[in-house]
Amino acid sequence: MPDADRAKLAAIETETVADGSLDPDIEAARVPSAKRRLDDNRSGKSETIASEVVERKLEELVGRP
């Protein structure tokens, strides 16, 4: 995912957590999970996939051109 898109997603996640709109149990689980995924990505333990690739694969799965 391009850096700009990752930044937008992180901002959305941060806003959602910050405004308290989620169930407290969900918030408690989500933040550590997001941090772990970010750490995995930064360390090279995981790889990102371009959104265009994901969209193309999804379209193939649902039978849309």
Image (tube, rainbow, N blue to C red):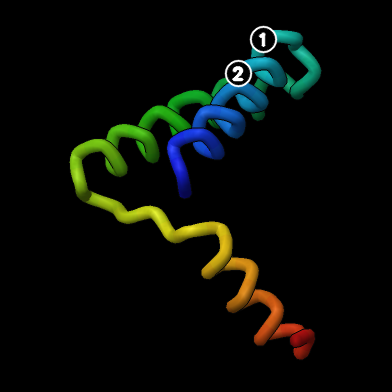
- Any mark on residue 46, and which? none
1 to the left or right of 12: left
Measured as percent of width and height from the top left, residue 33 is found at: 45, 34
Looking at this view, name the residue that lies furthest to the top: 19
Residue type highlighted by circle 1 = Ala
- Distance from label 2 to label 1 (Cα)? 6 Å
Question: Under tag 1, what secondary structure?
Answer: helix
Badge 2 density bin: few <14, some 14–19, many ≥20, Cα 10 Å: few
62 to the left or right of 50: right
Residue type highlighted by circle 2 = Thr
34 to the left or right of 62: left
Question: Under tag 2, what secondary structure?
Answer: helix
Tell me which residue sits at (76%, 90%) in the image: 63
Badge 1 density bin: few <14, some 14–19, many ≥20, Cα 10 Å: few
Measured as percent of width and height from the top left, residue 24 is found at: 69, 18
Tell me which residue sits at (32%, 55%) in the image: 47
- Position of residue 63 relative to residue 49, above or below, is below
Which one is nearer the viewer's eye here, 20 or 12?
12
Q: How many marks?
A: 2
Q: Which residue is label 1 attached to?
A: 18
64 to the left or right of 39: right
Q: Tell me whether circle 2 and circle 1 mark residues in contact (CB < 8 Å).
A: yes
Q: Which residue is label 2 attached to?
A: 14
Can residue 34 be seen from the camera position used here?
yes
Measured as percent of width and height from the top left, residue 61 is found at: 67, 85
Measured as percent of width and height from the top left, residue 62 is found at: 75, 84
